[in-house]
Amino acid sequence: MHGLINRAVQSFVSATYGQSCWMRVTDAADLGFTEFEAMLVYDDAMTTRVLDALCAELKRPRAEILEDLGTYLVSHPNMEDLRRLLRFGGDTYVEFLHSLDDLSDRVRLAVSDLRLPLLELREVSSSEYHLHCYSGLPGYASVMVGVLRAVADDYGALAFLTHEGQQGEVEVITIALVESAFSAGRNFDLGARKP
């Protein structure tokens, strides 16, 4: 598993539940260290052990935790660079949805050795979409549910999302767009500004 993914889990746990929680998780996962290096590649079994330990620590199902991770990736100030990458997908939530087919390629432009599973958006109607998440990263669809919810809020759109589960080789997320301009949304400027 790419270190950036493990580092995102570490950052999420530390920022949301505290450093002491992260220490208990790494101890229970028997990692032998407490900090993931972003640019290294780790055995997938390590990530699985960390997620298992986190589920046990929080007494919550993995899908819920991964959805919260997805929300964190878009909404927390620590993750502003990722939010910016996602927001380059378009000026509206619908444009963003249509850009998801290219997300894995955009990520590879930023980090050449990070391979995310393919996503395919299917438009059922002007207000309903199905996002097909292909296999390759266990739990990716759950993370994407959190990302899609947080990005909808970011754009000011009102959308209902349902993780439909596995359908053949893909996991399907249904996106029901109620209103694309429900609220003002979060401020966004294409030019990055450092404080």
Image (spheres, grey):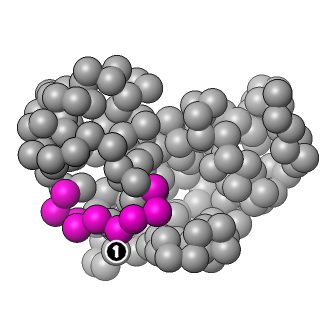
Residue occupied by mark 1:
136
Q: Quadrant of residue 22?
A: top left
Query: What is the magenta range?
Result: 38-46
Q: Which residue is most to the front?
A: 33
Numbered disc 1: secondary structure: loop
The answer to if 45 sits in the magenta stretch is: yes
Query: Residue 182 or 77: which is nearer the viewer?
Result: 77
Query: Residue 124 or 171: which is nearer the viewer?
Result: 171
Which residue corresponds to the image point at 33% horizontal and 24% vertical from the top-left? 19
Find residue 86 and report its horizontal and vertical position in percent: 68, 54
Which residue corresponds to the image point at 44% horizontal and 26% vertical from the top-left? 15
Q: Is residue 25 left or right of residue 67?
A: left
Residue 53 lies, with reference to residue 122, above or below; the image says above
- Check the picture and name the quadrant holding the C terminus: top right
Which residue corresponds to the image point at 39% horizontal and 65% vertical from the top-left? 40
Query: Residue 189 or 29: which is nearer the viewer?
Result: 29
Find residue 153 and report its horizontal and vertical position in percent: 66, 33
- Check the picture and name the quadrant holding the N terminus: bottom left
Can residue 101 be seen in the rendering of this structure?
Answer: no
Can residue 143 be seen in the rendering of this structure?
Answer: yes
